[in-house]
Image (spheres, rainbow, N blue to C red):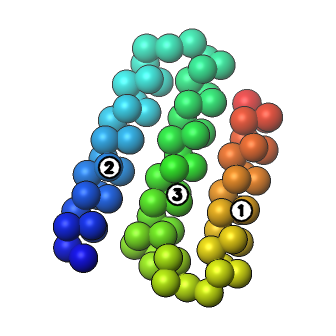
Amino acid sequence: MRDTISSTFILLLALTIIAAFLALNVSAEIMATTVVTLALIKFWLVAFQFMEIKKAHPFWKYLILGFGGLMGIILVILL
């Protein structure tokens, strides 16, 4: 359990650093899509690992997946 939390935390840090690096070095269209995608992945990692949605009823799992996907699609369309 401890290794999973630590590896998830390290992955979250790595995704944050990647997003910051890409925000400085790529064009605006690519940056917006990539940063939203990385934020969506981080949202799912936090929800399933730290909020323990992975142990919840399947309704909540699908709700979190659907909410994240819908928000990601809306943000990519708006940006």
Residue type at tag 1:
Phe
Going 79% across and 35% down the picture, which residue do you hit?
78
Going 31% across and 41% down the picture, which residue do you hit?
14
Residue 23 or residue 68, whichever sits in front: 68
Residue pointed to by mark 3 = 43
Task: In the displayed orientation, state which residue is furthest to the front.
Answer: 58
In the rendering, at what x and y percent does residue 74 appear? 78, 44
Q: Relative to 14, does residue 66 appear above or below in the rendering?
A: below
Mark 1 and mark 2: span between their CA atoms? 22 Å
In the rendering, at what x and y percent does residue 53 appear? 52, 77
Secondary structure beneath disc 2? Answer: helix
Q: Relative to 76, does residue 31 appear above or below in the rendering?
A: above
Q: Are marks 1 and 2 in contact (CB under 8 Å)?
A: no
Mark 2 and mark 3: span between their CA atoms? 12 Å
Residue type at tag 3:
Phe
Dot 2 or dot 3, earlier in sequence: 2
Residue pointed to by mark 2 = 11
